[in-house]
Amino acid sequence: MHRFANPARFLRIASALFPWVSVLCALSLAAGLWFALAASPADYQQGDSVRIMYVHVPAAWMGMFCYSAMALFSAVALIWKHPLADLLARATAPIGAAFTFLCLVSGSLWGRPMWGTWWAWDARLTSMLILLFLYLGYMALADAFDDPERGRKSAAILALVGFVNVPVIKWSVDWWNTLHQPASVIKRGGPAIDSSMLLPLLLMAIGFQLYYVVVLILRVRAEIAEAKIRTLRLAAIHAAGGDDSP
Amino acid sequence: MTRKRRRLYFVLLGMLVLGGATALVLTALKDNLVYFYSPSDLAAKAVAGRRMRIGGLVEEGSVVKDGTQARFKVTDLAHDVGVRYTGVLPDLFREGQGVVIEGRLGTDGVFDASEVLAKHDEKYMPKDVADSLKKAGQWKGEAR
C-alpha cells in the first residue's frame, strides 16, 4: 500500500488512466440514458415514472459507496498518516454529497405520484437524509480549524463514527416496516427486476461509478497543484530575505 | 507495539464499540422505528384514539366508494381492520395493493384515516411480461 501513497506516483497513474476513464464514463452514461429514457419498457404499474429509478438507485448506491470510501480513506489517514489518503477522503466528500442529494430529490419526485407524498419519515428515507448531513458536517468540520491538521483529524473521526449509518441504510427496509420498498437487485433469490430494466440500471451504475473516478482524479490533481503552489510561494518569500508579510 | 499498530487497534476497537452501541440503541427503539403497525399489532395493542399508521394489503372485494368517501379493509392475512377515508386515493391504490394509512382507531373499531399512501413493492417488469405471467398462471399476487 505504501507504494501508492506517493503523490507523484499517484499523479502518474491517474494521468495515464484519466482519458480512458473519461471516455468509458461518457459512453456508459450515453448508452445508459438511451436505454433508460427510450429503449426500455414502461413498468406494468408505475408506467413511465419507473425511469426515475435509473437515476435514483445508482445515485443511492454511489451515496453509500462514496461514504464507505471516505471512511476507509479517513481510517488510513488516521492510522498510517498518509497525506494522499486524507486528500482522497476530502475529495470524495462533495461528490458523495451530490449523489446523496440527487438520490433524495429524485426519490421525492417519484414518491409524489407513486406513494402520494413527497416525503415520509420512515427508516430508509431518514437514514439517507442523515447521510447527507454527515457529508455536510464532514466538509464543514474539515475547514473549521485554523490549524488544517486538526481539521483533518476531526473530520476523519467524524467520517469513521458516521460509518455506522451505512449498514443501517442498507438494511433499514428489512429490519423495520418502511414505506420504502425492499431491495430489488441485491437480494436473496436473485433480482426482482426484469432484465430489460436491469440493463439500463447497471449501465447507469457503471457510468456513475466512472464519473466518481473522473471527478476524484480532477479534484486530487487540483489539490496537489495547490499544495505545490503554496510551497513554492513560501520558498519564494524565504528566498526574498525572510520577509513574512504576504 | 508500534504507534501505527496501536492506532490501528484503537480505531478497530472504537468501531466495534460504536457498532455495538448502535445495535443496542436500535434494538431498544425497535417499536418506535417502524413506520407503520400491521393489523395484527393493532389487534394486540388496541390503542383507540392514538394517532398512528397502519399498513397492509387492501382486502379483495372490500372497497366501497361513495363519492369522495371510501371504505375498505386492510389485512395482513392474519387480522384485518376496517378503514374509513374521505379524500383522493393515490394512483396505485387498488384491491390487493399494499397501503400505509395514517389516522386513529375509532371507538367503533373502524380506523379513521386522514392520509392514505400506496406502498410500492420491489418488483419491476414491463406490462407484457406481467400480462403473460398472469396468463400462464404464474402470478403470485401484486404486493407480496
Image (tube, grey):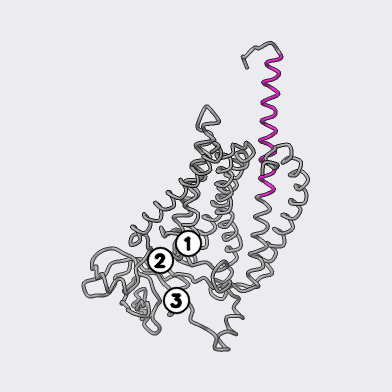
Magenta range is: A213-239
- Label 1 marks a residue whose chain is A
Q: Secondary structure at mark 3?
A: loop
Indicate yes or no whether the magenta region holds residue A215.
yes
- Give residue A192's position: percent from left, percent from top: 56, 73
- Disc 1 designates what residue? A171
| Majority secondary structure in the magenta region | helix
Crowd around label 3: few <14 · some 14–19 · many ≥20 (10 Å): many
Is the C terminus of chain A in the top left, top right, bottom left or bottom right quadrant?
A: top right
Residue A49 appearing in the image: no
Q: Secondary structure at mark 1?
A: helix
Q: Secondary structure at mark 2?
A: loop
Of the image marks 2 and 1, the number of the one nearer the N terminus: 1
Picture layout, residue B140 above or below residue A82: below
- Disc 3 designates what residue? B97
How far is mark 2 from mark 1, CA to CA? 11 Å
- Disc 2 designates what residue? A177
